[in-house]
Amino acid sequence: MQLTKTLKATVCAAVLAATAIPASAANIAVIAGSIEDGFFNLIKKGVDDATLMVEANGGSVNYLRTPNYDNFGPDLVNLINQAVAQGVDGIAIPVWVPEAQVPALQAAAEKGIKIMMYNSGQDVKDDVHGINYFGSDEFVAGKAGGAYMAEQGAKKILCHIHTPGAVNHESRCAGVKEGGEEGGSEVIILRTPANLDGDITGTAESIKSELVADQSIDAVISLAAWSADAATNAVAQIGAQDRVMVGSFDLSESALDRIKAGTQKMAIDQQPYLQGFLATSMLAAHIDFGTELATDPVLTGPAIVDASNIDTALAGVSKGAR
């Protein structure tokens, strides 16, 4: 009888102890680009959807963005330090400015904060003790874009970089150069000042100047959807629509409408929705449950969108997910 009572008491105590222990709950920060950059609204759509899952497990997600790209490296470090000061369990982040970000992320990792990479910085993942990388291999994506334009008949391709020095953008144009040259095209690179980021009119003027000065340029590849608007405007302003093809990285309704109308040749999609969704959900799951993916990196692109698959892409863009 005494043994039975003792066993019952032990079981009850164990149950009470188990119910008193709160479930593990990941509190994470997702750091992203400028609040003026519409690309990161697509990232945020993925983050928002993943946040529903994180909150269902008792966790939280704080989405942090830089004000612009004028002071990019220091602003990113400030956001990393802000997240650390808030006591987060994990940070999901691209690395665009390694010399600034890597030391700050290493310091965060030393404090036990888990680091998940997305969008940019695959090459420095191990340096910052990153768990995984979700995104496109920017060099491979650029190479695919350069090869595509060469296959379409381009002889001289202008690759436009709107944030000079950003490792992902420099890698994209390096890939365009290799892919284009392997296909028999000459490739030149135009770097415009970072303070023109998002400035369609100013960027169009810069691209137009290049096209007027060198009329052998017959293709332009821009690195963002908004700068594809600028490139298309530049081509139209000099009446060169029949001579100069336009391609871009990333999608927007205006870019896809142009592809459907035949005034833009293609766009290279890296599926930012998936980057935000997977980086957020997999970071939280790793913290909460210890889960890891066997595939590293997880590539979300490149996928070239042209006239052959435009309708499917338009459907995703209309829902804010592509």
Image: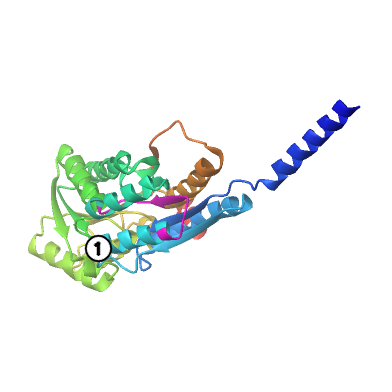
Task: Tell which residue pokes out farthest to the bottom in this image.
Answer: 201
Number of marks in the rendered image: 1
Q: Nearer the viewer, residue 148 or 74?
A: 74
Q: Reply yes or no: does residue 87 show up in magenta.
A: yes
Residue plotted at (45% across, 47% down) = 279
Q: In which quarter of the image is the N terminus?
A: top right
Residue plotted at (20% across, 67% down) = 239
Q: Reply yes or no: does residue 19 show up in magenta.
A: no
Q: Describe the element under mark 1 as helix, strand or loop.
A: helix
Magenta stretch? Answer: 85-97
Classify mark 1: residues with Cα within 10 Å, few (<14), some (14-19) or many (20+).
many
286 to the left or right of 143? right
Q: Which of 273 and 68 is in front in this view?
A: 68
**Looking at the picture, how far across and down is residue 291, in whole percent?**
52, 36
Please, is residue 262 above or below residue 182 in the view?
below
**Looking at the picture, how far across and down is residue 58, in whole percent?**
61, 52
**Which residue position is annotated with label 1?**
231
Q: Quadrant of residue 134?
A: top left
